[in-house]
Amino acid sequence: MMPHVMSELPKAYEPKHVEQKWQERWLRDGCFHADPHSNKPAYSIVIPPPNVTGVLHIGHVLNNTIQDILARRARQEGKEVLWLPGTDHAGIATQARVEKELAKENPPRTRFDVGREEFVKMVWDWKEEHGGIIINQLKKLGCSCDWERERFTMDSSYAPEVARAFTELFREGLIYRGLKMVNWDPVLLTALSDEEVIMTPSKSKLYTIRYRLEDDPEHYLLVATTRPETIMADVAVAVNPNDPRMAKWLGKRVMRPLVETPIPVIADEHVEIGFGTGALKITPAHDRVDFEVGVKFGLEIIDVLTPDGHINCPACPELHGMDRFEARDKSIELIRDKGLLEKEEAYENNVGVSQRSDVPIEPRLSMQWFLKYPCVHEAADAVEKGDITFRPAHWGKTYAHWLESIRDWCISRQLWWGHRIPVWYRKDLAEELKQATKLDVQDADAGRIYVGPEPPADVENWVQDEDALDTWFSSWLWPFATMDAECRAKFYPTTDLVTGPDIIFFWVARMIMAGYRFAGGKPFANVFFTSIVRDLLGRKMSKSLGNSPDPLDLISRYGADGLRFGLMRIAPTGTDVKFDEKQIEEGKNFANKLYNAVRFRLMQGETSTEPAPHFSAVHLDILSKLRDLHEQVTEALGKYEFNAYTQALYSFFWNEYCSLFLEAVKGDLREGADPSARNATLATIDTVLRHYLALLAPIMPHITEELWESLGFAARHAGKPLMLTELPKAESLLPGLEEEDISKARIIAAALYDAANRVRNLKAEYNLATNKNVHLVLRPTLPFGDDIAARLALLAGAKGTAIEPAYTAPKGTPSTLTPLGEIFMPLEGLVDVDAEKARISKELEKISTEIKRSQAKLSNESFVQRAPADVVQQEKERLADWQGKKEHLETMLAALG
RNA sequence: GCGAAGUUAGCUCAGUGGUAGAGCACAUCCUUCACACGGAUGGGGUCAUAAGUUCGAAUCUUAUACUUCGUACCA
């Protein structure tokens, strides 16, 4: 590349075209493709499949950037990498999406108007048309997934796995149909699992109601409730048998306040003595605990609610047909009118809310399919014993706790979109089977029902179950159901799983169980739980709050690389992260810095990949720091510390390379410079860039690829893209050098940079403009190379540095003590003795406090005796250093008179 | 109720026993031929509070307060 061409490059980096170009090229060249026949060691990740209805949000960016870093780094390390992408059919969300479209039609329609078959077809059509959105967004982020292997949880290759899993678990007796209390969503009209119900503290009222004694209406029992609208379904009042105040009521009967009927007072330990009035109304149809009590006492179950949450109680015409919340107020009105309301008070309790529809769920007695979880012990052991590693480790506790108190999973949903339950009922027994309170493998053996991945041969004599399976019943198979036999042989179990801790039960725990049950072992070796991204007020990102930044918008303004880098830089390993767009801007600024540093190199002519000859301490210094960077990067990634990884890359490049090294060597590149200095500097730059771009590539894949090519490095690797080029070895830096020489060089370089800082500082103290060219005189105390004085002048913004071991400064000349030696800054005719006196006095003051502190420490007997020798030694040196400075300043002050 | 994580500069966060850090923001200066998406300098912190362990604590222990999350059958 010719210099004059490069200098025509724009001054600011424009990510848009570069990123698009490389995304296309990577795809064109099949760079993301995983080869199951490769003899390289395998590295694999399956993507947590986003909902097919989803659009990319900032959580996805965090999650997938991490996966991409891991995958890209693994490729550089010579692994055969599979990152398997795909989407989840997301039963409820997707069905709701299409139902919404139907409702918008004129006239509006429901799925029942359309019919099951037609409706499912409509959802498929919708999926084909809109389902690719999030996949395309992931591509824009630069994700290096093997897109040829994109999977969908309802693919023709995936669905049979789901049915097979169901069938096997059924045959094993782990799946059964039963009439049980479930969480019922009155809006979506389906059962939900316990995990889909969010317990939400909410403000409600606690009503205390009088239940009159059957034989003696003047006396009444007080009962507290938050749900008076279900009072017509009361079948008993329970008190604690150990409650002395309640003993007299036992065996009596009281009148139910609405739809008046006598009901018994029974004794049950469930009732807490100190709470409320000590008496609990028992409504078995509408409360989980009450249901258990009802079963225990053989009580009647009276259901007074319709599936959609309206009162169904013709015996109470005032409430019949009313919405459950309106009925709550109305029922209290009726009770008050009867003089049966003792009091009402404000109250806060936990209400179960549907995760999907956001309305309070109803406990409801319902016929559903349930799963007793398989391989619970194996799953618990795997994490407990470290066969699967959780990071951060503390999530293991949450996981173990859930497994300990695990309850059967309600897996049937009253939906149409999803995997239909692979169960068929004999037509001639249909009515009988419908009523059966329990169906299991015995009924299949008896030929009453049929369960299998394929429909029964004489399907016309059977009728299939209407329900679909919970979406998670398909996603829990994801790590292996997405792979064919060949792929499984190479890539299962997967290496890493990267996901949010919010789906530890929904997904992670269930996948582990499924792995042991169906795939012969754990599904992954490591789980990395990301932080949850919040807004600056600490709130969760949500559509309704409108606080969720659009990643596509961020990409268009900061570049995908900038977004990735900025986000990683603030993503801590264990806690939540507050999203601040300023941080993303940092990522963009960094990309620009990198681009310009490379542009600067390109202006100097062609690059080479020859090893760098070492000309000066500054060259050795930067190469040695680069070697450290290799180590830091490897260590940080090994510990999944992505912010440490990013921070190390950032500070090496910006501070060490650009601010110090490049500024120190610029003189070598100017006209008339020593040719060997020029060669050494260019070769060092090329070496640094070659290694650095490779280290940075996993997190900023596009810009590094572009610069790698511009610098001509790709051409030297047979045109291979950086992403497929093996990582340069740290050991190739500084070959054949003694560590002692390297550390000497680092000491000199550090002294140089420190001295430059002190001079700049001195200039600022004298209010000299940065661009004011002063002269420096150095009285050296450290042996260093010939080039150092010139570099000092360059770094400090001086015209030159004269080395004069016997220099005597004119009175009042500003000076500073540096590790290189004493540096004077003669100012022609501008010496302000008073100002200099003041400056020195101020500095002396600071130093005195440091000396005092240090002396106090060293005169402490127990410190000197008990602290390790090196710490004491260090403290002594520190004190000596301060004292030297003090003497120097005092001499100067004295000289000023 | 129980459990977990957190509390460090105005903001977002690093920092696990030995002189408190980064970036942003702020103030002053600089458009010097890679970069103003930049450079230089500077101000700014009783490391939530209290007690303890230690020669020495942001760091280890314990308690307290607050924040967030998970979990529990409280009408």
Image: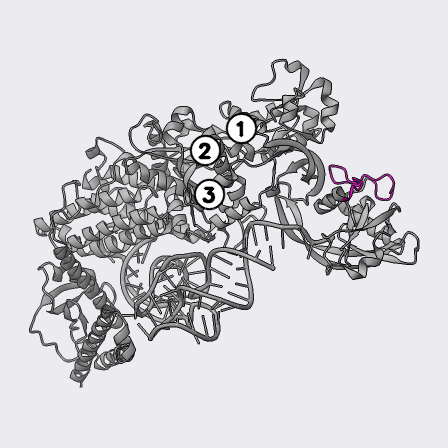
Q: What element carries label 2?
A: helix
On whether residue A457 falls in the magenta region, the answer is no
| Residue A819 coordinates in the image, percent (x, y) | 17, 67
The span picked out in magenta is: A297-320
Name above or below for residue A831 compared with residue A277.
below
Residue A461 versus residue A855: which sits nearer the camera?
A461
Q: What element carries label 1?
A: helix
**Residue A790 seen in the current view:** yes
| Residue A828 coordinates in the image, percent (x, y) | 15, 73
In the rendered structure, are the residues bearing label 2 and label 1 in contact, judged by CB atoms less than 8 Å apart?
no
Mark seen at residue A165? 1
Residue A561 versus residue A121: which sits nearer the camera?
A121
Name above or below for residue A769 compared with residue A107.
below
Q: What residue type is labelled 3?
A: Asp
Quadrant where the C terminus of chain A is found in the figure: bottom left
- Going from N to C along the chain, the mark reached first, 2 or 3, is 3
- Going from N to C along the chain, the mark reached first, 3 or 1, is 1
Callout 1 environment at 10 Å: few (<14), some (14 to 19), or many (20+)?
many
**Side of A367 where A46 appears, left or right:** left
Q: What residue type is labelled 2?
A: Pro
**Side of A58 where A226 appears, left or right:** right
- Please give the chain letter of the residue carrying mark 1: A
| Residue A667 coordinates in the image, percent (x, y) | 15, 54
Which residue, given by chain and number where applicable, does mark 3 sit on? A381
Distance in Å between CA atoms under marks 3 and 1: 22 Å
Distance in Å between CA atoms under marks 2 and 1: 14 Å
Q: What residue type is labelled 1?
A: Ala
> Quarter-wise, where is residue A186 in the image?
top right
User: What residue sits 56% from the left and 45% below the top?
Assistant: A543
Which residue, given by chain and number where applicable, does mark 2 sit on? A479
User: What residue sits 17% from the left and 42% below the top?
Assistant: A605
